[in-house]
Structures are given as C-alpha cells and as structure tokens.
Image (cartoon, rainbow, N blue to C red):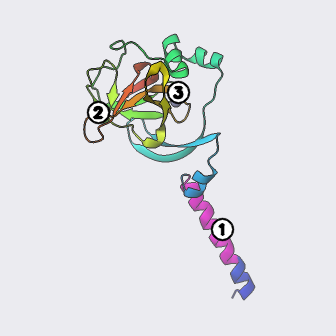
Amino acid sequence: MLNRRQFFRNSVMAVAGVSLVEWLRNPISSQAKANEDKDTVTIIQFSDAGQKLGPTRVNRVRKTESEWKQQLTALQFEVTRKAGTERAFSGQYDIHDRGLYRCICCDNALFSSDTKFDSGTGWPSFWAPIAKENVRTTGDSSLDMSRTAVSCTECEAHLGHVFDDGPKPTYLRYCMNSASLKFVKHG
Ligand SMILES: [Zn+2]
C-alpha cells in the first residue's frame, strides 16, 4: 500500500511522463508552435510515394551563397536564391506523370501531381501546395507588379508566384519554376 504522500508523488510523475510522451509524439502541438523560433520550422513530411507522414519540426536549412552555388546549377541558383524566373516553356516539367515535386534545394515536399493542371503558361502550375505548412507566401512588388511570391518553408528557396485565376476547387494558380523543383515519380 502506498501512503498518501507516495501516491501523490507517483501521480505527478505519471502525469509528467504522459505529457512528455504526448509532446514527443505531437511536435506540432500548440506549445511547440508557440516555441517555434527563427531557427526551426514545422513542415509536413511525405514519403517519396506521396504518403503523408505527419508534422515534423526541423532546423531551417541555411547555406552560404558559395555552398548553394556548389549544389545547384546556375539557373537553379538564379531562380531559388535570387528570385529569378526561368523562360516560359523552357522547363522540364511539362508532364502529367504521377508523383511528388520536392524542393531542389532541401527536398521539402512541395506539390503533388494530383493538383497539377495545364495552365498554358509554360510553367508548371498547381492549384494547391501539398501542405500549406510547407510553403510560405510574401508580397512581391518587384518589376512594378503587385504579386505574391511563394517560397519553401524549410530553406526559403524562391519557387514562383501564386495568382487567384486558377481552377476549382481553390481558384488559385501556383505558377512555379521547373528549376526550383525535383520530380519524384511514383512507381
Ligand atoms: Zn527548400
């Protein structure tokens, strides 16, 4: 038989133990979100087969310009790290194969072929990202235009822009650069 004091202490430890396990299992809990600082972000992970693996808190990917230049082609660097735009119809992703589009810089899952549509613009176009957590949008007033730029949450790679003239069900058109994407074909 436990006396009252032991019982109380064991209960407190049990509660603490349970919350720790919950915290480990749910890294996207409101507490974790509140603690999210500029060095970490929460993204939704996906397997190469497109299966949703759930939220994960990861370190932001930060590299120097020379490190990015070593990893990327000149075009990939210009688009993702300098917010450039590839020539229309010059990219490699005028395709409709089933698969997953990852970030060319950090492999973060960005888009699925399930939301890809033929926009006729010459750039790969999607009506939604694979998970809203995985991309960020920011105002872009460059080139005397008012646009919304889209970037990778994990490494801040510039991906393209989003417009509100897309198809159902979102009416959004994520106009992406092929150079910022890496296609992983489903088997
Ligand atoms: Zn990235």
From the viewer's perspective, is the residue at label 1 or at label 3 nearer?
3
Q: Can you identify the residue that label 3 sits on?
A: 157
Q: Which residue is more in the foreground, 100 or 14?
A: 100
Q: Is residue 186 visible?
A: no
Q: Magenta residues: mostly which secondary structure?
A: helix
* Residue type at tag 1: Ala
Looking at marks 2 and 3 on the same chain, the residue that comes earlier in the sequence is marked by 3
Secondary structure at badge 1 equals helix
Q: Position of residue 132 (x, y in %)?
A: 43, 42
From the viewer's perspective, is the residue at label 1 or at label 2 nearer?
2
Q: Which residue is more in the foreground, 142 or 34?
A: 142
* Residue type at tag 2: Gly
Q: Position of residue 97 (x, y in %)?
A: 28, 26
Q: Position of residue 2 (x, y in %)?
A: 70, 86
Q: Can you identify the residue that label 2 sits on?
A: 166
Q: Which residues are magenta?
A: 10-27
Mark 2 neighbour density, 10 Å: few (under 14) some (14–19) many (20 or more): some
Task: Tell whether position 22 is magenta.
Answer: yes
Furthest-right residue in view? 5
Q: Is residue 58 left or right of residue 137?
A: right
Q: Is residue 2 left or right of residue 28?
A: right
Quarter of the image where one finds residue 114: top left
* Residue type at tag 3: Ala
User: Ligand 1 within 8 A of label 3's CB?
Assistant: yes
Q: CA distance from mark 2 to mark 3?
A: 23 Å
Quarter of the image where one finds residue 61: top right
Q: CA distance from mark 1 to mark 3?
A: 40 Å
15 in relation to 33, above or below: below
Quarter of the image where one finds residue 12: bottom right
Q: Can you identify the residue that label 1 sits on?
A: 16
